[in-house]
Image (cartoon, rainbow, N blue to C red):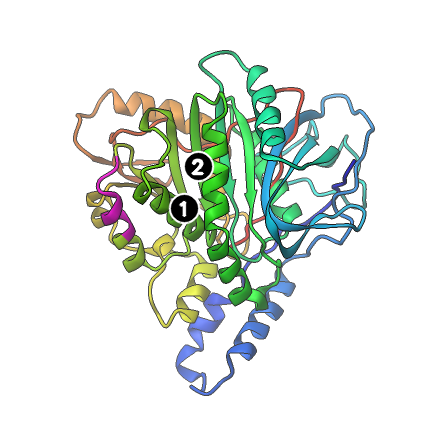
């Protein structure tokens, strides 16, 4: 048995202040000094989980809802109790199955972190059980077992790929929150690449993400080999680089997921150079189902990435929505939505909480508009290219009632 317990939101830091002072910074200022400054700003914004955050709690609490998340990861196993996986790179792809519970007083869009390990299931999100899995076959077996608990027509899978500066526990808890807040049935799968969860390890994380492309492709192929009827992919921040590259590889190799089994591909706050993304989309050709790109022009974490990239705008803060629509994207602009995190980088998780009500509004609006791409506004969210061939508004599917999912705070 393995463990889980507590964590608290963390973010990539300091873009607004760095950008404001950019002109005054000496050109010779060391790169490391910039990162350490960002780390200082980050630490002032939020707490981080301790090493024992995944300690299990077997206590039953009335009203607490269980979820199961399946994990595929390139992280190394961590022998410390309550940790499960570290930020170091492992030898290939590893697996786990984790059950967590969400407290009855859960607030949509938020995460009820345990105040102290192993947490209280009556008030906190806690891990109930976690086990390592050693083979591809065990991973697919567990996935099919969870799918079998759902009725035909609802056997869907969401694959979530986290971003930079994300501890394993943070990614696990964030996916749990999204799974719980959504009312779309399905099984959540976490693909977790080896991020160290440290602001100063941007280069290490970027290289880890790049190295994980083949294993994400392998994970998507395993999911496609299961009994899943629809497969939705949601990536956040730097996780978008891994995701789009893996999908591009699958396209080139002729091993892509059949179009009739793809739910949506959702790119949330993508930390990708806009020019790189344009070239990737051109290689895909205009997809049968457009990529859904969630942006926010006040995203401070992406502003920091923009600074490090020499002023090249990141896709998640791009201003030319119509150009992206022309390349085959639906753009969900959340700039006018007030963020729950100080870096404005985790709004995608709030969209999941809003999704049930928005889906009804979108369905009603869809009956009023024609077949051409349409720009609409709902509850401060601007959607460009609506009424292309998309499914429901992006939302993470909740796991069956006998299992558990997981999550990360607004992490890049």
Q: Determine whether, in the image, residue 185 is placed left or right of residue 270.
A: right
Disc 1 target residue? 246
Looking at the picture, how far across and down is residue 257, in whole percent? 37, 32
- Relative to the observer, which residue lies in front, 232 or 33? 232
Q: Is residue 9 magenta?
A: no
Instruction: Name the residue at 45% across, 42% down.
Output: 217
Magenta span covers which residues?
Answer: 280-287
Q: Examine the rendering and report whether any part of residue 76 can be seen.
A: yes
The local crowd at label 1, few if under 14, some if 14 to 19, many if 20 or more residues have their Cα within 10 Å, is: many
* The quadrant where residue 123 appears: top right
Q: Secondary structure at mark 1?
A: helix
Q: Is residue 61 left or right of residue 383?
A: right
Residue to which mark 2 is pinned: 233
Q: Residue at x 17, y 25 (%)?
A: 370
Q: CA distance from mark 2 to mark 1?
A: 12 Å
* Structural crowding at the residue carrying mark 2, measured as other residues with C-alpha within 10 Å and reported as few (<14), some (14–19) or many (≥20): many
User: Does the magenta stretch mainly form a helix, a strand or a loop?
Assistant: helix
Q: Earlier in the sequence, mark 2 or mark 1?
A: 2
The relative height of residue 222 versus residue 14 in the rendered view (above or below) is: above
Q: Residue at x 60, y 68 (%)?
A: 39
> Quarter-wise, where is residue 368 in the image?
top left
Marks 2 and 1 close (CB-CB < 8 Å): no
- Give the x, y percent position of residue 112: 68, 40
**Residue drawn at point x = 34 percent, y = 54 percent:** 315
Q: Is residue 283 magenta?
A: yes
Left or right, 21 with respect to 118, comes to left
């Amino acid at each position: 048995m393995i463990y889980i317990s507590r964590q608290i939101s963390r973010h990539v830091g300091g873009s607004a202040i760095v950008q404001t002072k950019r002109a005054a910074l000496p050109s010779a200022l060391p790169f490391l000094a910039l990162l350490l400054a960002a780390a200082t700003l980050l630490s002032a914004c939020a707490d981080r989980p301790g090493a024992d955050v995944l300690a299990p709690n077997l206590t039953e609490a009335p009203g607490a809802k269980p979820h199961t998340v399946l994990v595929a990861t390139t992280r190394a196993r961590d022998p410390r109790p309550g940790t499960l996986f570290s930020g170091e790179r492992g030898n290939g792809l590893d697996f786990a199955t984790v059950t967590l519970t969400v407290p009855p007083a859960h607030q949509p869009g938020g995460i009820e972190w345990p105040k102290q390990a192993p947490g209280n299931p009556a008030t906190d999100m806690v891990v109930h059980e976690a086990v390592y899995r050693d083979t591809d076959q065990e991973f697919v077996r567990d996935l099919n077992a969870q799918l079998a608990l759902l009725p035909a027509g609802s056997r869907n899978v969401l694959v979530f790929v986290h971003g930079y500066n994300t501890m394993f526990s943070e990614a696990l808890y964030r996916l749990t929150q999204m799974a719980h807040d959504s009312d779309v049935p399905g099984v959540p799968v976490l693909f977790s690449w080896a991020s160290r969860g440290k602001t100063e390890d941007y280069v290490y994380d970027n290289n880890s993400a790049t190295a994980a492309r083949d294993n994400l492709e392998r994970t998507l192929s395993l999911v496609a080999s299961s009994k899943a009827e629809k497969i939705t992919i949601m990536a956040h921040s730097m996780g978008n680089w891994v995701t789009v590259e893996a999908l591009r590889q699958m396209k080139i190799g002729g091993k892509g997921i059949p179009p009739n089994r793809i739910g949506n591909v959702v790119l949330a706050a993508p930390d990708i150079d806009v020019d790189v993304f344009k070239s990737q989309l051109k290689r895909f050709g205009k997809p049968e189902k457009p990529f859904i790109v969630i942006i926010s022009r006040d995203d401070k974490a992406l502003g920091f990435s923009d600074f490090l990239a020499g002023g090249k705008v990141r896709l998640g803060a791009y201003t030319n929505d119509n150009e992206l629509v022309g390349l085959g994207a639906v753009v969900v602009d959340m700039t006018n939505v007030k963020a729950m995190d100080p870096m404005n980088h985790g709004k995608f998780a709030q969209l999941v909480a809003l999704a049930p009500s928005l889906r009804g509004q979108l369905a009603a609006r869809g009956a009023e508009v024609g077949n051409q791409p349409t720009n609409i506004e709902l509850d401060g969210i601007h959607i460009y290219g609506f009424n292309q061939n998309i499914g429901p508004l992006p939302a993470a599917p909740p796991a069956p009632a006998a299992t558990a999912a997981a999550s990360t705070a607004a992490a890049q």
